[in-house]
Amino acid sequence: MVGETVKLLGPHRVGGVPPYGYRVENRKLVMDDDQSAHVRWIFDRFLDIGSCTELAREVGVLGIRTPRGNRIDKKYIYRMLSNRAYIGEAVHKGDSYPGEHDAIIDRETWEKVHAILQESPRKRAARTRAETPALLKGLLFGPDGAAFSPTHTRKGDRLYRYYVSQTVLKHGAGSCPVGRLAAGDIEAAVIDQLRAVFRQPEIVAGTLRVARTQDEEITEADARTALQQLDPLWDELFPAEQARIVALLVDRVDIGTDGLNVRLRMDGLGGLTREMLAGYMGTAE
């Protein structure tokens, strides 16, 4: 009975557009050498980084596109990672059966990928947060102009991260009025300032001017919407993506005894706006 069902599934399964990695020959799915290599790379790369958003960005940089020439976004990648055709199965009305085509992905890789996919985006982001480079590395400077360097100490199972002034490292404690900062506190303060900046009309106007140098069709409403979208998305972004955005937007952060000053990169804001409008940004699903 199962064998008969599979025979019926063959023509039904390939009646539409074949999954990326296959082509149709004589109403059967046949592996495409180039595309199937891309599929294996996408599955393997997802195991490394655990983020459809980051993976979509890398796929775009490599110039990999759908058979119809469209950009591969994070939703397309999520569907690829969930397509049981890649393990040689056919699906009909929610049930899967052995297919008549060759598998591109082995079962072990499939199960590892789906163990990651079953975690929530927030949980996956939190799991990798401690492995991320310091958010403000190379951007933070003290009242005497000296740079701050990231460092950390470990007590038992807990990791404590700090930024320490180069002045203190060279001349000892007391040589700078602001010598050491808790990394979590200063990073949160900078992010809060960025979030406030995204809502300022003059920043939206400046962002629009820069973005229009690359795309004249971007409107003020587009720029405002793109910047406002980043605020609610921020906590769900992977730490590596957060660090990339901070490096893109922040020229430097000056810390003094009375507070901090964040200097922005308007070209970075323009570039980020174009990314948002192109759909590259999103949660770490």
Image (cartoon, helix red, strand yellow):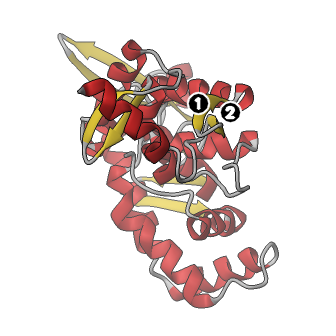
Residue type at mark 2 is Gln
Residue at 60% from the left image edge and 62% from the top image edge: 263
Q: Could you tell me residue 3's position as x and y percent?
A: 32, 24
Using residue 126 as the reference point, say whether residue 138 is left or right of it: right
Badge 2 density bin: few <14, some 14–19, many ≥20, Cα 10 Å: some
Q: Nearer the viewer, residue 120 or 65?
A: 65
Residue at 42% from the left image edge and 17% from the top image edge: 109
Q: Give the farthest residue toward the left.
A: 156
Q: Mark 2 — residue?
A: 35
- The quadrant holding residue 249 is bottom right
Residue at 49% from the left image edge and 21% from the top image edge: 105
Residue at 49% from the left image edge and 47% from the top image edge: 53
Give the quadrant of the N terminus.
Answer: top left
- The quadrant holding residue 234 is bottom left
Residue type at mark 1 is Val
- Kindly check if marks 2 and 1 are in contact, taking CB atoms under 8 A apart as contact: yes
Q: Nearer the viewer, residue 163 or 224?
A: 224
Q: Against 146, is 231 above or below?
A: below
Q: Give the farthest residue toward the top.
A: 156
Using residue 205 as the reference point, say whether residue 78 is left or right of it: left
Q: Mark 1 — residue?
A: 39
Q: Against 257, is 115 above or below?
A: above
Q: Nearer the viewer, residue 257 or 95?
A: 95
Secondary structure found at label 1: helix
- The reply to whether residue 20 is visible in this rendering is yes
Q: Could you tell me residue 254's position as x and y percent?
A: 54, 53
Q: Against 206, is 180 above or below?
A: above
Q: Nearer the viewer, residue 261 or 74?
A: 74
